[in-house]
């Protein structure tokens, strides 16, 4: 019997409490695999002096978690280097933060080869393979080189950049060509898919068919849109749990009657946190009557701390929150509570539920699961308001949110004032539209949509 093999940079143990600072990919795959079972392979997060390729196996119900250790140099060049100093900023339109080093690229290709040789023995004849995200774009090619003829799918969790930006990446062409070793390539939104097709057409001379078929030489792949969702049912239940109610009450009590505006983001420059703080300050200045009636809680667990740009954004936010609080605080009120730690998932659900408004204002985001989690955590009888950036992939689905341009402090400030004064009837109507989409297009829908396309792809080649 065939089983699904999922491959991503990191894996998330299915045992024990879920980690507090795991990213969106881990949360989503956790939800997708738990239902059907399979194998999940990735880097353990540990290093070893010399790479051995030894697999550590952990079985949890129907899911086998397989991990491998990497060398410190691998982590520097592949993870902190090419993935997070080259591809991440570039794919989020930040050429100014992008660094190109030959060593980074060499390490990236080496780790992709190491992943391929290590996972190879775990792959059965008919197993579908599903590779995730920008860390592993060339993995399909490496697996084909090892004779893997299985159906191969790739899903990109982050945006695909416009061609002019992508072309600033040295070796952009072999990187994109390697995607043609997959059978299905998935994107979060139509916009990212269109940007990929533009590059494939203009720069590779690929033939783009109407049904998502893209042909380059002898290879035809299907390029599809599959927006990722959350396990809505699980999250709605979590928001009603004892732990969530405790967190909600604790936060309510500490707010002493003020409305809470919440933000929850990995500390990352793509999330638009300095712009958000500045917009909130603009709100305080433009709406002085509302000043003492609100407080903002920004939860931002640090991430990728070995990368200098992440240390810089952290320092910038420390300064900005300190200045805004110093300037506007009173003896019994601090405008921004800025917290650099993560919370257990159920507690987070309670925090979302306590908040009258969520500010989800990334400058670029593949999807953004926080927006969906906030909606799922609301009390259906008295829901809060989601303010969402037009530059988050989620904006294509969550059209009942208050959609804003995160670069415009005035626009975001007005949206905050609008949200705070929105009558319950409008809040409920908007929430119903949002939750309907989030329940329908949940993480299982996403999984089935992608794997359905993979199953329908033309029969695998034979070596
Ligand atoms: C990438 C793409 C895409 C955050 N703080 C805590 C915590 N989190 C969890 C959230 C959410 C996840 O982390 C963040 O997911 P996002 O989707 O918002 O963002 P990225 O990490 O950048 O994810 C993104 C995603 O992949 C999936 O494809 O949507 O566009 O960039 O689930 O809840 N979780 C807990 N405590 C925290 O303090 N437990």
Image (tube, rainbow, N blue to C red):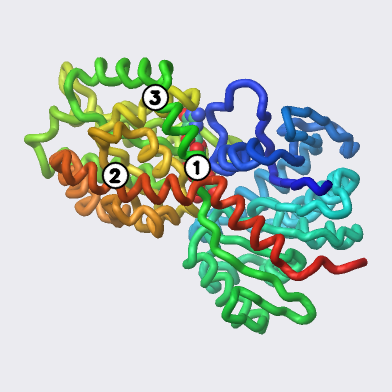
Query: What is the quadrant of residue 295 in the picture?
Result: top left
Residue marked by disc 2: 431
Observer-nearest residue: 208 or 117? 208
The residue carrying mark 3 is 240
Label 1: which secondary element: loop
| Element at label 3 | loop
Between 277 and 129, the residue placed more toward the observer is 129
Label 3 C-beta lies within 8 Å of the nearest ligand 1 atom: no
Q: Are marks 2 and 1 in contact (CB under 8 Å)?
A: no
Q: Quadrant of the C terminus?
A: bottom right
Quick one: SS at disc 2? helix
Q: Are marks 3 and 1 in contact (CB under 8 Å)?
A: no
Answer above or below: position of 206 versus 280: below
Q: Which is more foreground, mark 3 or mark 1?
A: 3
**146 in relation to 209, above or below:** above
Q: Viewed as shown, does residue 451 lie left or right of 58?
A: left
Q: Position of residue 269 (x, y in %)?
A: 46, 46
Binning the other alpha carbons within 10 Å of mark 3 as few (below 14), some (14 to 19) or many (20 upward) gives some
Q: Position of residue 152 (x, y in %)?
A: 75, 59
Residue closest to the eye, 411 or 212: 212
């Amino acid at each position: 019997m065939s089983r699904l093999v999922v491959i991503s940079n990191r894996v998330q143990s299915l045992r024990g409490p879920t980690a507090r600072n795991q990213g969106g990919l881990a949360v989503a795959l956790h939800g997708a695999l738990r239902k059907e079972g399979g194998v999940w392979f990735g880097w353990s997060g540990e290093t070893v002096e010399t790479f051995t390729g030894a697999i550590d196996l952990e079985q949890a119900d129907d899911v086998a978690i397989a991990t491998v250790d990497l060398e410190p140099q691998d982590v520097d060049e592949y993870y902190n280097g090419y993935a997070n100093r080259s591809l991440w900023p570039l794919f989020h339109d930040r050429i100014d933060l992008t660094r190109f080093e030959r060593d980074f690229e060499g390490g990236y290709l080496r780790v992709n080869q190491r992943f391929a040789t290590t996972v190879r023995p775990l792959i059965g004849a008919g197993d579908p393979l599903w590779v995730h995200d920008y860390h592993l774009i060339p993995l399909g090619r490496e697996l084909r080189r090892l004779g893997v003829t299985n159906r191969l799918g790739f899903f990109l969790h982050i945006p695909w950049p416009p061609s002019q930006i992508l072309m600033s990446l040295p070796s952009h062409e072999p990187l994109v060509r390697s995607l043609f070793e997959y059978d299905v390539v998935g994107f979060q939104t139509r916009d990212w898919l269109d940007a990929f097709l533009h590059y494939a057409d203009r720069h590779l001379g690929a033939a783009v068919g109407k049904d998502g078929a893209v042909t380059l030489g002898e290879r035809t792949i299907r390029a599809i849109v599959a927006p990722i969702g959350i396990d809505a049912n699980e999250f709605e239940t979590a928001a009603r749990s004892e732990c969530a109610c405790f967190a909600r009450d604790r936060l309510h009590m500490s707010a002493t009657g003020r409305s809470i505006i919440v933000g929850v983001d990995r500390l990352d420059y793509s999330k638009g946190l300095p712009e958000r703080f500045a917009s909130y300050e603009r709100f305080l200045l433009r709406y002085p009557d509302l000043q003492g009636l609100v407080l903002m809680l920004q939860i931002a667990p640090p991430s990728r701390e070995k990368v200098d740009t992440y240390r810089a954004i952290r320092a910038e936010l420390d300064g900005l929150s300190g200045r805004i609080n110093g300037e506007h605080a009173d003896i019994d009120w601090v405008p921004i509570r800025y917290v650099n730690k993560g919370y257990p998932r159920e507690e987070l659900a309670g925090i979302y539920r306590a908040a009258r408004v969520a500010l989800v204002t990334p400058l670029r985001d593949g999807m953004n699961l926080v927006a969906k989690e906030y909606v799922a955590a609301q009390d259906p009888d008295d829901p809060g308001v989601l303010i969402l950036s037009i530059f988050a992939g989620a904006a294509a689905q969550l059209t009942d949110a208050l959609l804003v341009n995160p670069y415009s402090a005035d626009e975001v400030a007005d949206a905050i004032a609008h949200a705070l004064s929105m009558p319950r009837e409008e809040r409920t109507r908007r929430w119903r539209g949002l939750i309907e989409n989030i329940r329908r297009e949940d993480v299982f829908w996403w999984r089935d949509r992608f794997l359905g396309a993979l199953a329908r792809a033309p029969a695998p080649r034979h070596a």
